[in-house]
Image (cartoon, coloured by chain):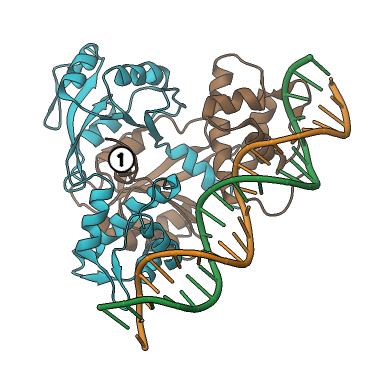
Chain colours: A brown, B cyan, C orange, D green
Amino acid sequence: MSSNFIPDIVVARLPRYLQALYQMEEEGKHSTSSQELGDRIGISAAQIRKDLSHFGEFGKQGTGYAIPYLVDQLQIILKVKQVWDIVVVGTGDLGHAIARFQGFANRGYRVAMVFDNDPRKIGGKVGQFIIQDMQNLIPMVQQAGIKIAMLTVPPAVAQSVAENLVRAQVCAILSYAPVPLHLPAHIKVEYIDPIIQLQHMTYYIG
Amino acid sequence: MSSNFIPDIVVARLPRYLQALYQMEEEGKHSTSSQELGDRIGISAAQIRKDLSHFGEFGKQGTGYAIPYLVDQLQIILKVKQVWDIVVVGTGDLGHAIARFQGFANRGYRVAMVFDNDPRKIGGKVGQFIIQDMQNLIPMVQQAGIKIAMLTVPPAVAQSVAENLVRAQVCAILSYAPVPLHLPAHIKVEYIDPIIQLQHMTYYIG
DNA sequence: CATTGTGAACGGGTTCACAGCA
DNA sequence: TGCTGTGAACCCGTTCACAATG
């Protein structure tokens, strides 16, 4: 039963389901059950069935889920049957790693442009990309219609760069800068910060 | 009022509070309120007060919180007044970026060792570290008493490398490999996977 | 008077348990 | 028989609202 509003926390779990299903496909499996899938990612079977039920009925009683079909449906739900262009801003070590990362292929994304503001870097290459001047970010990103950005600039400039991305019509930002961004409510922002996660874990050590 | 069990989700927010407080310190601020702190990170003031109340009474009515004191208390709670050694396993682009990352300083962590299994890399340097042979991982990590690992190896070997880390007495693993790890319950595992987060965001785009 | 700490009320996500179906 | 989809029960985290206090 697909209803109107779906809790964000449910949406957040779908990519994990998809990730585990990709893994099963690579292992040559053709079907699975909520139980098996749940064991793999440490989530209860009931949780998975309930989550999926928000979007439709994808399984068969007694049989479970056909993996290719469920993968397909999740790809549609998450809008990753298309390929999204990504702009990477900041070409430090992390920006390099992202620009050269091979794992976006077949997952719905591809890096399309890379920017930096360092004159010594602009015009140089990172992976297959020529580093563009950040001064041209707004027109170039807007022109290209890029909707997703990954941010690997120093924390001191993260907010202002993010604001420029918003001006360029980007609507989702994945930020590696360890500062909270303040942007219009319709912009989706997520953070990757290893220190936050390490501190979370060390609470439990010792 | 500090009680025995504290919800994991509360613990997970503490590093974000600490992060925002560091930022305030850099701005020269000496005190703050639950309201101001909450505005900064997008959390309600009541939530912050309730979270902190699990661990003690750190504020003053009418005044708010003294930033240096609250920082100090959070550092104690999260056990980051000490410096934790980290072992990095895998020296691809991402391993490089982590090994050279300057942001661990003053946050409670420091990279102490770097491993890879590629003979062409072993003995070479990444940042200031000599790349060690993964065959020696268990004795060396155990000998050094390292409790925290960051994992940047290919997904196909992530599970077996993680098991070796557990054998080496590591008890917290921050994995960048896009596969769920199956380890003993007492091991803390967290994941960083940009694809998961991108897919979460693209659900809402369009 | 601003702001904390907190019991109580609330709300929503998770689990339960079972009907239904292959 | 095995497993899904789902309403209902449950549980737990969040918000509310206010007494307490510098």
Name which residue lies at 49% across and 52% down.
A147
Quadrant placement of the N terminus of chain B:
bottom left
Name which residue lies at 66% across and 31% down.
A72
Between B182 and A29, the residue placed more toward the observer is: B182
* Residue B200 in view, yes or no: yes
> Which residue sits furthest left?
B128
Say whether residue B198 is left or right of residue B58: right
In the image, residue A126 sits, relative to residue B69, either above or below, namely above
Q: Position of residue D4 (x, y in %)?
A: 74, 30
In the image, residue A42 sits, relative to residue A8, either above or below, namely above
Say whether residue B170 is left or right of residue B39: left
Q: What kind of residue is marked 1?
A: Leu
Residue B100 occupies quadrant: top left
Q: Position of residue A107 (x, y in %)?
A: 52, 33
Q: Position of residue B90 (x, y in %)?
A: 28, 24
Say whether residue A20 is left or right of residue A87: right
- The chain carrying label 1 is A
Residue A53 occupies quadrant: top right
Name which residue lies at 67% across and 30% down.
A70
Residue holding disc 1: A198
